[in-house]
Image (tube, helix red, strand yellow):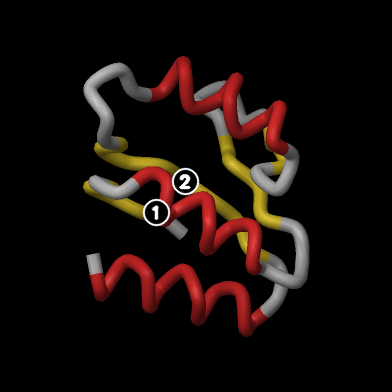
Amino acid sequence: MKVQNIQNVEKFFEVIDKCAGKVELVTGEGDRLNLKSKLSQYVSMAKLFSDGSIAELEIIAYEPEDITKLVNFMMEN
């Protein structure tokens, strides 16, 4: 799923942390980074944005309830 225009990055990571299953970021090269890993969060996000927001990401969530959490976050923000 593609997520766009994330203004509240801290809240985005809170939602990721609450996910039951694996949530991965798909890089431009096709690599997949585990977003539940704090190290991966810091490394990947430092490369993706510098102005405090994220324009667009492709992420994969494997559990249906996690997809619902992420969709709800995107609709609320």
Residue at image x 69%, y 35%?
Answer: 38
Question: In the picture shown, does residue 62 fall above or below 56?
Answer: below
| Location of residue 62 (image quadrant) | bottom right
Question: How far separated are the C-alphas under marks 2 and 1?
Answer: 4 Å
Q: Position of residue 49 (x, y in %)?
A: 34, 23
What numbered label is drawn on residue 58?
A: 2
Q: Point out the tag, 2 or 1, that comes first from the N-terminus.
A: 1
Q: Dots 2 and 1: beta carbons under 8 Å?
A: yes
Residue 50: quadrant of the picture: top left
The residue that appears at 39% across and 54% down in the rendered structure is 2
31, above or below 50, in the image:
below
Q: Which residue is mark 1?
A: 2
Q: Amino acid at mark 2?
A: Glu
Q: Secondary structure at mark 2?
A: strand
* Place of residue 4 in the rendered image (x, y in percent of width and height, measured from the top left): 28, 50
Residue at x-position 32% and y-position 41%: 56
The x, y position of residue 8, in whole percent, is: 30, 49
Residue 35 location, quadrant: top right
Residue at the image position 24 percent from the left and 46 percent from the top: 7
Is 32 situated left or right of 6 in this image? right
Question: Closer to the camera, 51 or 22?
Answer: 51
